[in-house]
Protein backbone atom coordinates (compact mmCIF):
# COMPACT_ATOMS: atom_id res chain seq x y z
CA UNK A 1 0.00 0.00 0.00
CA UNK A 2 1.30 3.45 -0.94
CA UNK A 3 1.32 6.71 1.00
CA UNK A 4 -1.64 9.07 1.27
CA UNK A 5 -0.44 12.67 1.54
CA UNK A 6 -2.44 15.19 3.56
CA UNK A 7 -1.71 18.90 3.00
CA UNK A 8 -3.15 21.75 5.05
CA UNK A 9 -2.58 25.02 3.19
CA UNK A 10 -3.16 27.80 5.71
CA UNK A 11 -2.84 31.58 5.54
CA UNK A 12 0.70 31.68 6.92
CA UNK A 13 2.00 28.10 6.92
CA UNK A 14 1.52 24.83 5.09
CA UNK A 15 1.61 21.49 6.91
CA UNK A 16 2.09 18.16 5.18
CA UNK A 17 1.99 14.59 6.46
CA UNK A 18 2.08 11.13 5.02
CA UNK A 19 -0.26 8.39 6.18
CA UNK A 20 0.72 4.79 5.61
CA UNK A 21 -1.24 1.89 7.10
CA UNK A 22 -2.72 4.14 9.76
CA UNK A 23 0.62 5.59 10.82
CA UNK A 24 1.68 9.23 10.52
CA UNK A 25 4.90 9.59 8.54
CA UNK A 26 7.29 12.54 9.02
CA UNK A 27 5.06 15.63 9.33
CA UNK A 28 6.67 18.93 8.29
CA UNK A 29 5.62 22.55 7.92
CA UNK A 30 6.97 25.48 5.92
CA UNK A 31 6.24 29.18 5.56
CA UNK A 32 6.26 30.96 2.19
CA UNK A 33 5.21 34.30 0.76
CA UNK A 34 2.15 32.90 -1.00
CA UNK A 35 0.00 29.82 -0.66
CA UNK A 36 0.82 28.20 -4.01
CA UNK A 37 4.56 28.49 -3.35
CA UNK A 38 3.98 27.17 0.15
CA UNK A 39 1.99 24.17 -1.09
CA UNK A 40 4.44 23.07 -3.76
CA UNK A 41 7.41 23.91 -1.57
CA UNK A 42 6.11 21.73 1.26
CA UNK A 43 5.35 18.89 -1.13
CA UNK A 44 8.80 19.03 -2.73
CA UNK A 45 10.54 19.20 0.66
CA UNK A 46 8.52 16.25 1.93
CA UNK A 47 9.52 14.10 -1.04
CA UNK A 48 13.17 15.11 -0.72
CA UNK A 49 13.48 14.70 3.07
CA UNK A 50 11.75 11.33 3.15
CA UNK A 51 13.18 9.97 -0.13
CA UNK A 52 9.64 9.40 -1.40
CA UNK A 53 9.04 8.91 -5.14
CA UNK A 54 5.92 10.15 -6.88
CA UNK A 55 5.10 6.53 -7.67
CA UNK A 56 4.98 5.79 -3.91
CA UNK A 57 1.98 8.10 -3.47
CA UNK A 58 -1.56 6.78 -3.89
CA UNK A 59 -3.45 10.02 -3.27
CA UNK A 60 -3.06 13.65 -2.24
CA UNK A 61 -5.73 15.20 -0.02
CA UNK A 62 -5.69 19.01 0.28
CA UNK A 63 -7.50 21.21 2.79
CA UNK A 64 -7.28 24.71 4.28
CA UNK A 65 -7.99 28.10 2.77
CA UNK A 66 -5.25 27.61 0.17
CA UNK A 67 -6.93 24.48 -1.21
CA UNK A 68 -8.98 26.79 -3.44
CA UNK A 69 -5.83 27.31 -5.55
CA UNK A 70 -5.71 23.61 -6.42
CA UNK A 71 -7.70 22.93 -9.58
CA UNK A 72 -5.86 19.93 -11.05
CA UNK A 73 -3.86 16.89 -9.93
CA UNK A 74 -0.55 17.78 -8.27
CA UNK A 75 2.26 16.40 -10.46
CA UNK A 76 -0.26 14.05 -12.05
CA UNK A 77 -1.18 12.36 -8.76
CA UNK A 78 -4.91 12.02 -7.97
CA UNK A 79 -5.76 15.03 -5.79
CA UNK A 80 -8.94 15.80 -3.87
CA UNK A 81 -10.07 18.65 -1.64
CA UNK A 82 -11.36 18.08 1.89
CA UNK A 83 -13.63 20.29 3.97
CA UNK A 84 -11.35 21.92 6.56
CA UNK A 85 -13.70 21.46 9.51
CA UNK A 86 -14.13 17.77 8.70
CA UNK A 87 -10.34 17.46 8.53
CA UNK A 88 -10.01 19.24 11.89
CA UNK A 89 -12.43 16.82 13.51
CA UNK A 90 -11.07 13.63 12.02
CA UNK A 91 -7.45 14.54 12.70
CA UNK A 92 -8.11 15.56 16.30
CA UNK A 93 -10.21 12.45 16.93
CA UNK A 94 -7.48 10.23 15.46
CA UNK A 95 -4.68 11.85 17.47
CA UNK A 96 -6.51 12.22 20.80
CA UNK A 97 -8.42 8.96 20.78
CA UNK A 98 -11.54 10.84 21.90
CA UNK A 99 -14.82 10.21 20.09
CA UNK A 100 -16.73 13.01 21.81
CA UNK A 101 -15.06 16.40 22.19
CA UNK A 102 -14.89 19.93 20.86
CA UNK A 103 -11.90 20.55 18.62
CA UNK A 104 -10.37 23.98 19.09
CA UNK A 105 -8.42 24.82 15.93
CA UNK A 106 -6.06 27.63 16.90
CA UNK A 107 -4.89 29.10 13.63
CA UNK A 108 -4.86 32.69 12.41
CA UNK A 109 -8.30 32.82 13.99
CA UNK A 110 -9.99 30.05 15.98
CA UNK A 111 -12.74 27.64 14.98
CA UNK A 112 -14.75 25.19 17.09
CA UNK A 113 -15.74 21.79 15.71
CA UNK A 114 -17.96 19.46 17.69
CA UNK A 115 -17.29 15.73 17.37
CA UNK A 116 -19.67 13.04 18.53
CA UNK A 117 -18.57 9.81 16.88
CA UNK A 118 -18.97 10.26 13.14
CA UNK A 119 -21.06 13.39 13.62
CA UNK A 120 -18.52 16.17 12.99
CA UNK A 121 -19.78 19.72 12.55
CA UNK A 122 -18.56 23.28 12.76
CA UNK A 123 -20.30 25.15 15.59
CA UNK A 124 -18.62 28.55 15.42
CA UNK A 125 -15.42 30.46 15.98
CA UNK A 126 -13.79 33.70 17.04
CA UNK A 127 -11.48 36.13 15.25
CA UNK A 128 -8.73 35.70 17.83
CA UNK A 129 -5.74 33.46 17.24
CA UNK A 130 -2.20 33.46 15.96
CA UNK A 131 -2.94 36.39 13.69
CA UNK A 132 -4.03 38.43 16.70
CA UNK A 133 -0.84 37.53 18.55
CA UNK A 134 1.36 38.51 15.62
CA UNK A 135 -0.53 41.72 14.87
CA UNK A 136 -0.46 42.99 18.43
CA UNK A 137 3.21 42.03 18.72
CA UNK A 138 4.03 44.05 15.61
CA UNK A 139 2.30 47.10 17.06
CA UNK A 140 3.39 46.77 20.68
CA UNK A 141 6.73 44.94 20.49
CA UNK A 142 7.94 45.81 16.99
CA UNK A 143 8.34 42.13 16.11
CA UNK A 144 6.34 39.26 14.69
CA UNK A 145 9.03 36.62 15.26
CA UNK A 146 7.35 33.85 17.32
CA UNK A 147 10.62 32.79 18.95
CA UNK A 148 11.41 36.34 20.05
CA UNK A 149 7.89 36.85 21.41
CA UNK A 150 8.09 33.59 23.36
CA UNK A 151 11.53 34.45 24.69
CA UNK A 152 10.31 37.82 25.95
CA UNK A 153 7.19 36.30 27.49
CA UNK A 154 9.17 33.71 29.43
CA UNK A 155 10.68 36.60 31.42
CA UNK A 156 7.40 38.50 31.93
CA UNK A 157 5.23 38.94 35.02
CA UNK A 158 1.52 38.72 34.26
CA UNK A 159 0.58 40.42 37.56
CA UNK A 160 1.99 43.64 36.10
CA UNK A 161 -0.44 43.47 33.15
CA UNK A 162 -3.66 41.71 34.17
CA UNK A 163 -5.96 42.67 37.04
CA UNK A 164 -6.32 39.58 39.23
CA UNK A 165 -9.03 38.67 41.75
CA UNK A 166 -6.44 39.21 44.46
CA UNK A 167 -6.15 42.85 43.36
CA UNK A 168 -9.81 43.59 44.01
CA UNK A 169 -10.71 41.28 46.87
CA UNK A 170 -9.12 40.27 50.18
CA UNK A 171 -10.44 36.75 49.81
CA UNK A 172 -11.33 34.37 46.94
CA UNK A 173 -14.72 34.91 45.35
CA UNK A 174 -17.07 31.93 44.85
CA UNK A 175 -15.39 29.70 42.27
CA UNK A 176 -12.62 32.22 41.62
CA UNK A 177 -9.18 31.85 43.25
CA UNK A 178 -7.02 34.87 44.04
CA UNK A 179 -4.84 34.35 40.93
CA UNK A 180 -7.80 34.17 38.50
CA UNK A 181 -7.98 36.93 35.89
CA UNK A 182 -10.47 39.71 36.61
CA UNK A 183 -9.53 41.88 33.62
CA UNK A 184 -7.02 41.35 30.83
CA UNK A 185 -4.47 44.17 30.37
CA UNK A 186 -6.26 46.30 32.97
CA UNK A 187 -3.03 47.05 34.91
CA UNK A 188 -0.78 47.69 31.90
CA UNK A 189 1.13 50.97 32.00
CA UNK A 190 2.41 53.00 29.05
CA UNK A 191 6.01 52.15 29.98
CA UNK A 192 5.44 48.46 30.71
CA UNK A 193 8.50 46.27 29.97
CA UNK A 194 8.35 44.36 26.69
CA UNK A 195 8.64 41.09 28.61
CA UNK A 196 5.43 41.79 30.53
CA UNK A 197 3.61 42.98 27.40
CA UNK A 198 4.64 39.85 25.47
CA UNK A 199 3.29 37.61 28.23
CA UNK A 200 0.15 39.73 28.41
CA UNK A 201 -0.53 39.30 24.69
CA UNK A 202 -0.01 35.54 24.76
CA UNK A 203 -2.10 35.15 27.92
CA UNK A 204 -4.92 37.23 26.47
CA UNK A 205 -5.06 35.17 23.27
CA UNK A 206 -4.85 31.77 24.97
CA UNK A 207 -7.26 32.62 27.80
CA UNK A 208 -9.81 34.09 25.41
CA UNK A 209 -9.67 31.01 23.20
CA UNK A 210 -10.05 28.72 26.21
CA UNK A 211 -12.97 30.67 27.65
CA UNK A 212 -14.73 30.79 24.27
CA UNK A 213 -14.23 27.04 23.86
CA UNK A 214 -15.83 26.37 27.23
CA UNK A 215 -18.78 28.60 26.36
CA UNK A 216 -19.20 26.79 23.03
CA UNK A 217 -19.86 23.57 24.96
CA UNK A 218 -22.66 24.89 27.15
CA UNK A 219 -25.66 22.52 27.28
CA UNK A 220 -23.77 19.89 25.26
CA UNK A 221 -22.42 17.91 28.20
CA UNK A 222 -18.97 17.94 26.59
CA UNK A 223 -16.06 18.43 28.97
CA UNK A 224 -13.16 17.49 26.67
CA UNK A 225 -11.46 19.99 24.35
CA UNK A 226 -8.77 19.03 21.85
CA UNK A 227 -6.42 21.90 21.05
CA UNK A 228 -4.82 21.84 17.60
CA UNK A 229 -2.81 24.29 15.50
CA UNK A 230 0.42 26.25 15.82
CA UNK A 231 -0.50 28.01 19.06
CA UNK A 232 -0.35 24.67 20.91
CA UNK A 233 3.44 25.01 20.67
CA UNK A 234 3.44 28.02 23.02
CA UNK A 235 4.93 27.00 26.39
CA UNK A 236 2.35 29.17 28.17
CA UNK A 237 -0.31 26.59 27.23
CA UNK A 238 1.09 24.42 30.03
CA UNK A 239 0.20 27.08 32.59
CA UNK A 240 -2.98 28.63 31.25
CA UNK A 241 -5.06 25.58 30.29
CA UNK A 242 -4.51 23.60 33.51
CA UNK A 243 -5.71 26.72 35.36
CA UNK A 244 -8.88 26.81 33.24
CA UNK A 245 -9.33 23.06 33.77
CA UNK A 246 -9.29 23.53 37.54
CA UNK A 247 -11.59 26.53 37.37
CA UNK A 248 -14.25 25.02 35.11
CA UNK A 249 -13.84 21.25 35.72
CA UNK A 250 -13.03 20.49 32.08
CA UNK A 251 -10.13 18.84 30.24
CA UNK A 252 -7.91 20.33 27.54
CA UNK A 253 -5.93 17.87 25.44
CA UNK A 254 -2.92 18.67 23.23
CA UNK A 255 -2.11 15.64 21.05
CA UNK A 256 1.41 14.69 19.98
CA UNK A 257 0.93 16.05 16.46
CA UNK A 258 -1.43 18.86 17.46
CA UNK A 259 -0.12 21.33 14.87
CA UNK A 260 -0.57 18.76 12.08
CA UNK A 261 -4.04 17.45 12.98
CA UNK A 262 -5.80 19.17 10.07
CA UNK A 263 -3.35 17.68 7.54
CA UNK A 264 -3.73 14.27 9.22
CA UNK A 265 -7.51 14.59 9.02
CA UNK A 266 -7.28 15.45 5.34
CA UNK A 267 -5.31 12.26 4.68
CA UNK A 268 -7.78 10.21 6.74
CA UNK A 269 -10.62 11.46 4.52
CA UNK A 270 -9.24 9.36 1.66
CA UNK A 271 -11.25 6.49 3.06
CA UNK A 272 -14.42 8.59 3.01
CA UNK A 273 -14.45 9.68 -0.64
Image (spheres, rainbow, N blue to C red):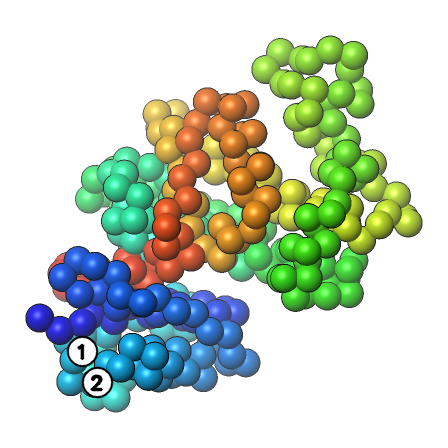
**Which residue is situated farthest in the left direction here?**
1
Q: Which structural element holds mark 1?
A: strand
The residue drawn where x is 30% and y is 81% is: 47
Residue 189 can be seen, yes or no: yes
Q: Mark 2 Cα within 10 Å, few/some/many (few <14, many 20+)?
A: few
Q: CA distance from mark 2 to mark 1?
A: 7 Å
Is 273 left or right of 251, judged from the image as shown? Answer: left
Q: Quadrant of residue 149?
A: bottom right
Looking at the rendered image, the disc whose residue lies closer to the viewer, 2 or 1, is: 2
Residue 221 x %, y % = 35, 25
On screen, 123 above or below 75? Answer: above
Q: Could you tell me which quadrant the N terminus lies in?
A: bottom left
Q: Which mark is residue 26?
A: none
Residue 251 x %, y % = 42, 31
**Which residue is situated farthest in the right direction here?**
191
User: Are the residues flagged by discs 2 and 1 in contact, CB closer than 8 Å?
Assistant: yes
The residue drawn where x is 35% and y is 66% is: 27
Is 201 left or right of 16, judged from the image as shown? Answer: right
The residue drawn where x is 57% and y is 57% is: 130
Is 91 left or right of 218, judged from the image as shown? Answer: left
Residue 210 x %, y % = 53, 38
The residue drawn where x is 66% and y is 43% is: 204
For label 2, the residue is 53
Amino acid sequence: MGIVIGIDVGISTTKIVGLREGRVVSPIRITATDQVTSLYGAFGKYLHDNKVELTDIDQIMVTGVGASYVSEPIYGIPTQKVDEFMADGMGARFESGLSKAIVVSMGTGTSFVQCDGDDIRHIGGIGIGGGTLQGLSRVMLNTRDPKQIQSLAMQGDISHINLLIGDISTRPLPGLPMDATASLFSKAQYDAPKEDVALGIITMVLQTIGSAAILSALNSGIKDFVLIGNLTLLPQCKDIYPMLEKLYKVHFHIPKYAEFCTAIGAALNYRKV
